[in-house]
Amino acid sequence: MISRRLLRIKTLQVLYAYYLSDNPSLEKSKKELLFSVEKTYELYHYLILLILDITDYSETRNDIARSKYFPTEEEANPNVRFLTNPVISTLRNNPELKRYIGTKRISWVNYPELIKNLYNEFINHEAYKDYMDSPQADFGQHKDIVSFLLTDIIIQSDLLQQILEEQSIYWNDALDFAGLMAQKTVASCKESGKIKVFPKFKNDDDRQFLLELFQKSVNKSSENRDLIKRFADNWEFERIALMDIFIMQIAITEAIEFPSIPTKVTFNEFIEISKYYSTEKSSQFINGILDKAFHTLKAENKIQKTGRGLIGEV
C-alpha cells in the first residue's frame, strides 16, 4: 500500500500547485491528489511487469538461438533455470496482478530497448551467473535473484528513470516508493504460491487522511501561517521559501488536527520530507520552527492527542 510518507508528499505537491494556480479549486485538487496516488500504484505494477517482460525476452532469445540451422550445444540445450523460476511464475499467475495489468492495459511494448538494456545488464552480472551456474537452487536463491533483478538492475536503471520522467510528472518522485512496494511483494512470495499484493491504501483511514490533510491545510492556511510568523523569530516571513512555508503549514495542520497521530511522528516525517524538498539550511530552519511551535502549542493545549499511549504526550 502507499505509505503515509508518500501521502504527505503528494499533499505537499498538490498544495503547492493549488496556491500557484490562477484559478485554484479544492475539488479539482482533491481529484488531482487521488489521481497522483493512483499513478504511483500503477507504477508498482509496471515494475513487476518489467520482471515478467525481461523473462519473456530471455525466452525469446533462447527460442531464436535454438532455431538456428547449426545451434551450439548451449543454444540447443539452454539453461532454463531463470525461465522456470517459481517466484516469477507466482507473479505471472497471480490473479490480482493479472487483473490490474489487464484492466489498466499497462505495457512496456513501446520500450523494447529498455527491456533489452535491462536484460543484457542482468545476464552479464556476476549475481546472475552465480545463480545460473549453481549446481542447484533452492527457493531462497530463486527469490534472491528476482529481488536482485528488481532492486539492483531495474530500479537503478538510468534509462528507466529517463522514461518515467518523460511519461508522467507523477512518477518523478514515486520510483523509490513504488519500488519498495514491489520489493515487499517479491519478498512475500512463498513456496506454496502465496504472495502479498498490496492494495492502493492500507485502509479507508489512509484515503480519508490524505483528503483531510489537504483540505484542512487549505482551510487553516491563514492561522497556520500566522503561527509560522510567530515562531520565525527575526526572520521576515516574505523571505521564507514558499516550499518551506507549505511544509510547515501541513506539519502544523497534522499536529493540531489529527489527534491520533503522535506529534513525534509528524515532526520526524516532515523533517525527513524537508531534507528532500528543501536545502540543508532550510531543513534546519524548519526543524527549529516546528520544534518551538509544537512545544508551545502543546503547552497552550492547542495540540491534544487521544488514544492509547498518546494522552498527555510530551
Image (cartoon, rainbow, N blue to C red):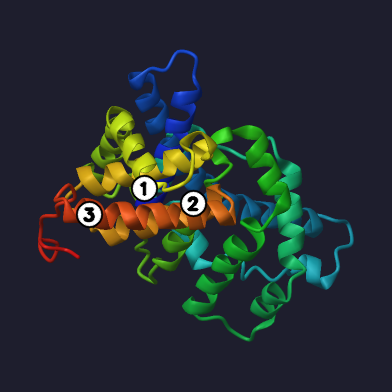
Mark linked to residue 261 = 3
Number of the front mark, 3 or 2: 2
Gap in Å between the C-alphas at discs 1 and 3? 22 Å
Query: Splitting the image into 4 quarters, where does residue 75 fall?
Result: bottom right
**Which residue is found at the position 89% from the left and 62% from the top?**
70
SS category of the residue bearing label 1: helix
- Evaluate if marks 3 and 2 touch, with contact meaning CB atoms under 8 Å apart: no
| Residue matched to label 1 | 231
> Which is nearer the N-term, disc 1 or disc 2?
1
Q: Amino acid at mark 2?
A: Ser
SS category of the residue bearing label 2: helix
Depth order, front residue of 42/218: 218
Question: The C terminus is located in which quarter?
Answer: bottom left
Gap in Å between the C-alphas at discs 1 and 2? 18 Å
- Number of residues whose C-alpha sits closer than 10 Å to that of mark 1, classed few (under 14), some (14–19) or many (20 or more): some
Whole-percent x, y for residue 214 in the image: 33, 34
Whole-percent x, y for residue 304 in the image: 14, 52
Q: Amino acid at mark 1?
A: Phe
- Number of residues whose C-alpha sits closer than 10 Å to that of mark 2, classed few (under 14), some (14–19) or many (20 or more): many
Depth order, front residue of 180/85: 180
| Residue matched to label 2 | 274
> Which is nearer the N-term, disc 1 or disc 3?
1
SS category of the residue bearing label 3: loop
Judge from the rendering whether residue 14 lies leftward or rightward of residue 303; answer left or right. Answer: right
